[in-house]
Image (cartoon, rainbow, N blue to C red):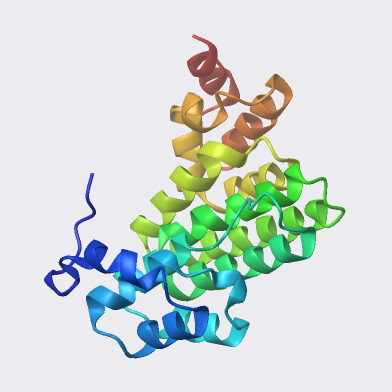
């Protein structure tokens, strides 16, 4: 299905073949100075691993949302020949992107980059999961404080529904249950939504925490999960 983009990007795909023949410096110039349709096409073909980190940070800060989304999608997560150091770089780029722009594409690429670290057996992977899990807990706290329903839903859909099997993320999630009664109530009234794929010990731990933090009593939520 074709993405819905503002009118100024109409026909952007038509520019891709010609732009694929350009060098990285030429693509950088297109992204910085070209018309909208050529900018987004250049972002779709550029190899970000050849772009200076400061340039990427500038784009994160300044590009319009459709182009920032394309930038996020260009993060080369899980590239077969990449090394651990490169994967760590993309973890940080995606984290910064989501921190600055709140676009869920950056969130998706952040966790794809973490998975890449994990799948390569990188020694840095456990610490990266811990760091990002703690960071996400803080992001959730801030989103809840400003009643940002869209951000809370994105975190639930793209993170909680997929990564609670990781110990660091599960621990951060349990911390959120303690701090957010609304999340505790949501988890305890519909436990299969986020807890259905977890081991029984983690299901019990989460529902017990939710029950202590304003959710349904453990007996009721456990019955709802297994009934």
Which image quadrant for residue 12?
bottom left
Residue plotted at (48% across, 76% down): 100
Front residue of 172/90: it is 90
21 in relation to 221, above or below: below
Say which quadrant the N terminus sits in.
top left
Q: Please indicate whether residue 133 sits to the left or right of residue 1 in the image.
A: right
Q: Please indicate whether residue 22 sits to the left or right of residue 135 in the image.
A: left
Residue plotted at (71% across, 45% down): 171
Residue plotted at (73% across, 53% down): 129
Farthest residue in the left direction? 7
Q: Please indicate whether residue 196 sits to the left or right of residue 72 in the image.
A: right
210 in relation to 121, above or below: above
- Is residue 146 among the parts visible in the rendering? no
Q: Please indicate whether residue 106 sits to the left or right of residue 153 in the image.
A: right
Which image quadrant for residue 18?
bottom left
Front residue of 122/98: it is 122
Image location (x, y in percent) of residue 115:
67, 47
Image location (x, y in percent) of residue 81:
71, 53
Front residue of 211/148: it is 148
Residue plotted at (19% across, 57% down): 4
Image location (x, y in percent) of residue 145:
45, 66
How many badges with numbers are in the image? 0
């Amino acid at each position: 299905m074709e993405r819905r983009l503002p009118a100024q990007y109409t026909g952007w795909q038509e520019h891709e073949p010609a732009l694929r023949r350009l060098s990285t410096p030429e693509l950088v110039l297109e992204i910085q100075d070209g018309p909208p349709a050529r900018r987004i096409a250049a972002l779709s073909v550029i190899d970000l691993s050849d772009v200076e980190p400061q340039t990427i940070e500038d784009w994160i800060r300044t590009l319009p949302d459709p182009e920032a989304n394309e930038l996020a999608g260009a993060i080369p997560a899980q590239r077969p020949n990449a090394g651990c150091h490169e994967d760590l770089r993309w973890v940080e780029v995606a984290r910064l992107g989501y921190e600055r722009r709140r676009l869920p594409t950056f969130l998706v690429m952040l966790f794809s980059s973490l998975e890449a670290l994990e799948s390569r057996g990188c020694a840095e992977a456990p610490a990266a999961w811990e760091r990002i899990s703690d960071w996400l807990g803080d992001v959730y706290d801030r989103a809840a404080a400003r009643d940002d329903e869209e951000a809370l839903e994105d975190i639930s859909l793209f993170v909680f529904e997929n990564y609670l099997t990781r110990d660091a993320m599960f621990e951060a999630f349990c911390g959120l249950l303690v701090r957010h009664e609304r999340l505790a109530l949501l988890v305890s009234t519909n436990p299969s939504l986020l807890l259905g794929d977890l081991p029984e010990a983690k299901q019990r731990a989460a529902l017990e925490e939710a029950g202590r933090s304003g959710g349904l009593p453990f007996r009721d939520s456990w019955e709802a999960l297994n009934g």
